[in-house]
Image: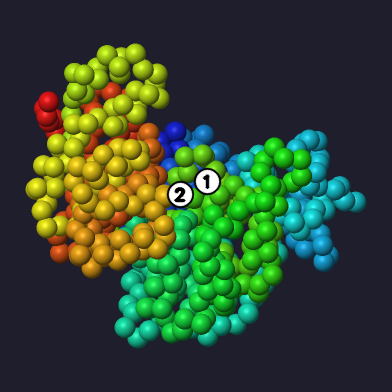
Amino acid sequence: MIDKPLMVQSDKTMLLDVHSPSFQECRNDIIAFADLVKSPEHIHTYTLSPLTLWNAVSSGLSSDEIIKRLRKWSRYEIDERVIFFIEDTASRYGEFILTEEDQDNLRLSVKRERFFLTLYSEPTLKKYLKKGDGNYFLLSKLDRGSLKAKLVKMGFPVDDRIPLKKGEKLELDLKDTVEVRDYQKDSVDAFLSSGGYGTIVLPCGSGKTIVGIETAVRLKTNTLILCPNVSSVHQWIRELLDKTTLTPDKIGEYSGETKSIRPVTVCTYQVLTYRTKQEGEEAEPDYPHFSLLSDNNWGLVIYDEVHMLPAPVFRITAELQSIYRLGLTATLIREDGREDEVFSLVGPKRYDTPWAELTQKGYIAKAYCHEVRIPLPHTLELEYALATKKEKYRLASQNPLKIKVAEEILKRHEGESILIIGQYLDQLKVFQDHFGYPIITGTTSNKKRDELYDKFRSGEEKVMIVSKIANFAVDLPDASVAIEISGSFGSRQEEAQRLGRILRPKARDSHFYTIVTEYSQEEEFASNRQKFLSEQGYSYSIVKEDVR
């Protein structure tokens, strides 16, 4: 008798028993059309959504096959509403087909008359679509990305059948000393076999940079890499030189400091979206650096930390729609809810794997999460009571008693590589004045940042104070302790990234501390962040410290 470890619920969530003998086989069957949202010790939770189903159908999986797999593994009879949702949602993919019409225009064909009329009568689409002779519209190639993003928000995913063009050929290989892990190979296989566009979701510290490099090596084409900051640009360049046969003259940096275009060019989102006119001015904003996208024969674009993709890149992406495009991220969560635009413009999720699974295999460090709750000083209680909601959060976050707790944690982990991470610059400055450790904030020059990161990597500096500038794409492999003294309200995305600073595999376990003012606005928001990490399978201890 087949083991049935899956429970499909009417709210479109699915519970999978981790201890079932068929756990891995079932997981492999459902991950193609469902997102993993929680992975604590015993039961993993997956969810079905329009995006997960469109991801699956775009990869060749039919609604019949999806339902067949669910019935194979489901312990109980599946609610008919779930069956209807799968069939109806999946049927929408392929209703809207985008093809090339001529040198300047594209054709959007619509299969069903009622969907055609829906688009024809939608006022917000009139500036993009021109009615054709049949059930189709014509649109400018320049509006390709914007239209796809608007339609997916309306519940109409576009089947983009315009062939990807090949970029200029580039000879590059991995050095013999570089080992690509099985899951990294699998993720690149999934990306390339699904059309060469899409997003790969892997935990922080699991080697997403290697995935990007392996993709470029397999395609052997000119590559543009987009990153969130200059530190991550320099990290990518170091990795390319260290891991591939590329020589320095083949790698360019395109940032605020340097604008060098080479066969492999690494660029910041910030410089790419720089504009000469601001919103509210009469003329349309001009993005002078977007020529980087159109004037060079790229064959692959890699979006590092794709969940941070800025809005202008969503709007002006015509050039990047026609080539291989790979998004890399530890979490597709966007606090602005624009995950569907990543689906439209970069591509569907092609691969992910649970954090806990890579921890068990030793690919990322075992981490323990601790929340330390402390009281508010008596001297601030009246001020807190009279403050606005926003002011309450700031007062609680900057609780001066946090220094005492940080002192104890630093003493407990003496000799380890430690990051003190915070949201508020004046709070970070107070910590620097008290402890004397070096500090990195948004105002620190890129040269100084790189110097301090290098000292931390070499062990010359064992403790460093960092603002949210260090949340993303900073490779500090020896960091084993993070002390979070304040955060961005309830940002799950930020919590995942901060934990990721200490997840590189190492001999010792890692520890992530969050210091929170109890009975305060901060405690409320921290519980949201804590819940997210617990759902990824991390143990979480909560202790109270009376440090008054």
Q: Is residue 451 above or below residue 14?
A: below
Q: Image quarter for residue 432?
A: top left
Q: Secondary structure at mark 1?
A: helix
In this picture, is 515 found above or below 5?
above
Residue 158 can be seen, yes or no: no
Query: What's under tag 2, amino acid-wise?
Result: Leu
Q: Residue at x 42, y 60 (%)?
A: 446
Which comes before the other along the chain, label 1 or label 2? 2
Outermost right residue:
133
Asked which secondary structure carries label 2, the reply is loop
Q: In this orientation, which residue lies closer to the viewer: 362 or 369?
A: 369
Is residue 312 visible in the rendered image? The answer is yes
The x, y position of residue 474, in whole percent, is 36, 59
* Residue at 45% in and 68% down: 212
Q: CA distance from mark 1 to mark 2?
A: 6 Å
**Given the image, on which type of amino acid does mark 1 rest?**
Glu
**Residue name at image x 41 percent, y 78 percent:** 241
Picture coordinates of residue 525 (x, y %)?
34, 31
Q: Which mark is residue 339?
A: 1
- List x then y, in percent, for residue 537: 26, 47
Evaluate if marks 1 and 2 touch, with contact meaning CB atoms under 8 Å apart: yes
The label shown at residue 70 is none
Judge by depth and name the residue closer to the eye, 248 or 301: 248
Determine the residue positioned at 31% across, 26% down: 395
Q: Which residue is mark 2?
A: 332
Looking at the image, residue 376 sits to the left or right of residue 323; the answer is: left
Whether residue 223 sits left or right of residue 130 in the image: it is left
User: Counting other residues with Cα less than 10 Å from the Cα at mark 1, is it few (<14), some (14-19), or many (20 or more)?
Assistant: some
Instruction: Tell me how many marks there are.
Output: 2
Task: Give the quarter of the image for residue 127.
Answer: top right
Q: Nearer the viewer, residue 164 or 467?
A: 467
